[in-house]
């Protein structure tokens, strides 16, 4: 193997010869002479120590034999510019490749994206491993990681900018159609649906509008929604829509898209943000079932909860041990105009009761102290205190000074404390309280994964100014989320199998640990594993049905591939230099 540097041809008078093989000048060193008794003459023992540089007289490219016979010559302290680091982080790359292969994602993207499919997937992997989506830092990531581009080519940030500015509308639609076509549409599924918004500095982005931002209301936002399958293992489809459109309005358009993707037997698991009479009637008309969480203190379910308090909290038959709560189901109409019977599943948790009561009483005490001080100063309540005034006090009179003589409503406060620890789930389909809670709890996974899109993919803001760039980046983020969700699911199942919590089995911790698996380029210019796989890394790999032997095999294959790439690049440079000299 030839080293990635140039050295001066050593001074060894009479012992160096040059021999051309396929028009390439190789330098041989005579290291010994042996006397042949039969032939009665000395024969030279020679070894190739490198190749002569035809474009630079007196210089050569050494190989490993050069270091053996001329150790004193040494190598240059400053090597020529390298396109790839001598230390490649490969562990997480191997795992993500395994996940891609399981979904045939690389083939699907290659068919839809075309020649830039490798760069598309590299950007997705980049956002997962670095938890960021700032494209200008991609070349730094590519320098010390294996890549999916052809010949692992490292593209500049200008190439990435051109790539993101492409109009990928047709390709995005094609991928979503292909991705959802592979799902099983015959069985009834529950889709967990959630939305958020992304801050934007506007520019020329048409979707960016002032809306109901969840973080910074002073900036325009883009709304972004994702539909997950029932088990929250796979994102199904997504949509980006203007920031001024509220989630509850967009839901009806999303339901039509679900039907277009072929999901006919569908139920939806929604949070209270999508609760509305219009959405409920729309789902009824289209034959969609729903599971919706509502706050226990909401006026809609308040009466239902009060009607069952004391009837199920201690009953063994009402115990749902897997979630450490008690539950009961009450048929009830959702609205007076409802034509269908709904099912209110009321739950009670002792732990939730203690936490909520403590929090509620602290808030009431704090506000009562402030209101008392204001009464002494004859200052009327404002803001949040005005909102809670009717809860804490009642008016003795109807004039403007009634606040000064108001008395505390102890009974009302006690009634609110009674409702602490209760929560409700409403379903359109008849089921037990345990079934309803199990369905909704599966949504916890989608909320964690959805939060991961912003926190762990760096997608809280898009950092681009054009419509095409925003569309392409969100498309890449969705593919990255598919991969990350699969990693999350595998790690979660492995912990459940072992029935123990391990801190290194979270996605960021696991990927960080796998990043420590490195391949080092040796003096012979070949990449090899730097050290054996650790026990922690083996435990993480087991979640993906991988072993240390798999890492060794994949490392060997990658080493061969890197050697081939570097050999081809060296030959190409030599050919170019030859053409220049001619």
Image (spheres, rainbow, N blue to C red):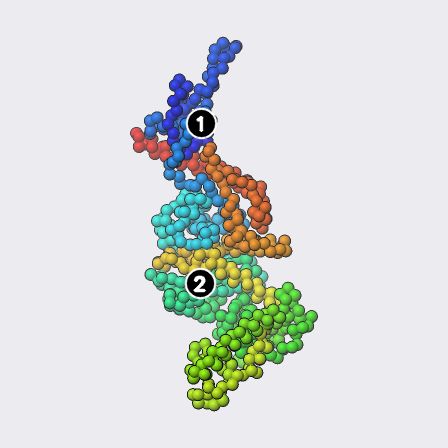
Look at the numbered disc 1 and give the secondary structure of its residue: loop
The residue under the point 39% across, 19% down is 13
- Circle 1 residues within 10 Å: few <14, some 14–19, many ≥20: few
Number of marks present in the image shown? 2
Which dot marks residue 423?
Answer: none
- Circle 2 residues within 10 Å: few <14, some 14–19, many ≥20: some
Question: Where does residue 507 sit, x and y in percent of width and height?
Answer: 52, 54
Residue at the farthest right position: 316
Question: Where does residue 299 sit, x and y in percent of width and height?
Answer: 53, 78
The residue under the point 46% across, 70% down is 248
Question: Where does residue 264 sit, x and y in percent of width and height?
Answer: 54, 64
Q: Can you tell which quarter of the image residue 473 is in?
A: bottom left
Q: Is residue 58 visible?
A: yes
Which residue is at the front of the view, 582 or 562?
562
Q: CA distance from mark 2 to mark 1?
A: 62 Å
Which residue is at the front of the view, 240 or 441?
441
Residue that label 1 marks: 71
Query: Do the residues under discs 2 and 1 have CB atoms within 8 angstroms?
Result: no
Which residue is at the front of the view, 443 or 284?
443
Look at the numbered disc 2 and give the secondary structure of its residue: strand
Residue that label 2 marks: 224
Question: Where does residue 350 sit, x and y in percent of width and height?
Answer: 62, 70
Position of the C terminus, as image quadrant, is: top left
Query: From the viewer's perspective, is 90 left or right of 52?
Result: right
The residue under the point 44% across, 67% down is 214
Q: Can you tell which quarter of the image residue 16 is in?
A: top left
């Amino acid at each position: 193997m030839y080293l990635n540097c140039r050295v001066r041809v050593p001074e060894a008078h009479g012992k160096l010869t040059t021999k051309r093989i396929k028009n390439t000048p190789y330098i041989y060193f005579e290291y010994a002479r042996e006397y042949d008794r039969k032939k009665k003459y000395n024969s030279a023992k020679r070894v190739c120590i490198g190749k002569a540089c035809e474009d630079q007289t007196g210089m050569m490219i050494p190989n490993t034999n050069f270091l053996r016979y001329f150790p004193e010559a040494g190598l240059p302290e400053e090597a020529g510019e390298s396109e790839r680091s001598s230390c490649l982080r490969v562990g997480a790359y191997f795992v993500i490749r395994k996940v891609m292969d399981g979904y045939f994602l690389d083939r699907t993207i290659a068919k839809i994206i075309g020649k830039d499919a490798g760069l598309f997937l590299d950007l997705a992997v980049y956002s997962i491993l670095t938890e960021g989506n700032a494209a200008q830092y991609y070349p730094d990531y590519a320098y010390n990681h294996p890549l999916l581009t052809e010949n692992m080519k490292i593209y500049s940030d200008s190439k990435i900018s051109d790539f993101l500015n492409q109009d990928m509308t047709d390709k995005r639609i094609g991928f979503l159609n292909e991705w959802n076509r592979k799902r099983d549409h015959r069985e009834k599924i529950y889709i967990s649906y959630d939305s958020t918004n992304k801050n934007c500095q506007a520019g020329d982005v048409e979707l960016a509008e002032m809306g109901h931002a969840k973080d910074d209301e002073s900036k325009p936002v883009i709304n972004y929604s994702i539909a997950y399958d029932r088990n929250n293992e796979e994102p199904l489809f997504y949509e980006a829509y203007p920031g001024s459109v509220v989630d509850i309005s967009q839901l009806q358009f999303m339901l039509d898209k679900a039907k277009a993707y072929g999901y006919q037997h569908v139920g939806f698991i929604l949070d209270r943000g999508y609760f509305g009479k219009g959405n409920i009637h729309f789902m009824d008309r289209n034959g969609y079932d729903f599971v919706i969480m509502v706050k226990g203190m909401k006026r809609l379910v308040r009466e239902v909860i009060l009607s069952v308090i004391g009837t199920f909290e201690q009953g063994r038959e009402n115990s749902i041990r897997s979630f450490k709560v008690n539950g009961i189901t009450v048929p009830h109409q959702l609205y007076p105009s409802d034509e269908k019977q709904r099912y209110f599943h009321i739950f009670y948790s002792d732990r939730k009761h203690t936490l909520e009561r403590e929090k509620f009483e602290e808030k009431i005490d704090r506000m009562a102290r402030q209101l008392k001080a204001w009464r002494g100063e004859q200052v009327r309540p404002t803001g949040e205190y005005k909102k809670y005034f009717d809860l804490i006090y009642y008016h003795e009179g109807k004039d403007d000074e009634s606040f000064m003589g108001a008395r505390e409503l102890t009974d009302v406060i006690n009634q609110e404390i009674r409702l602490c620890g209760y929560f409700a789930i409403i379903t359109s389909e008849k089921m037990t309280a345990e079934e309803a809670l199990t369905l909704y709890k599966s949504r916890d996974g989608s909320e964690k994964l959805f939060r991961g899109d912003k926190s762990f993919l760096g997608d809280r803001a898009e950092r681009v100014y054009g419509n095409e760039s925003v569309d392409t980046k969100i498309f890449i983020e969705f593919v990255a989320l598919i991969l990350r969700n699969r990693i999350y699911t595998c790690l979660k199942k492995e912990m459940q199998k072992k029935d123990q919590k391990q801190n290194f089995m979270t996605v960021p911790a696991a990927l960080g640990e796998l990043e420590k698996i490195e391949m080092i380029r040796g003096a012979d210019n070949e990449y090899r594993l730097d050290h054996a796989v650790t026990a922690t890394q083996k435990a993480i790999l087991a979640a993906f049905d991988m072993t240390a032997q798999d890492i060794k095999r994949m490392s060997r294959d990658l080493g061969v591939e890197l050697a081939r790439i570097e050999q081809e690049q060296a030959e190409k440079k030599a050919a170019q230099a030859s053409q220049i000299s001619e």
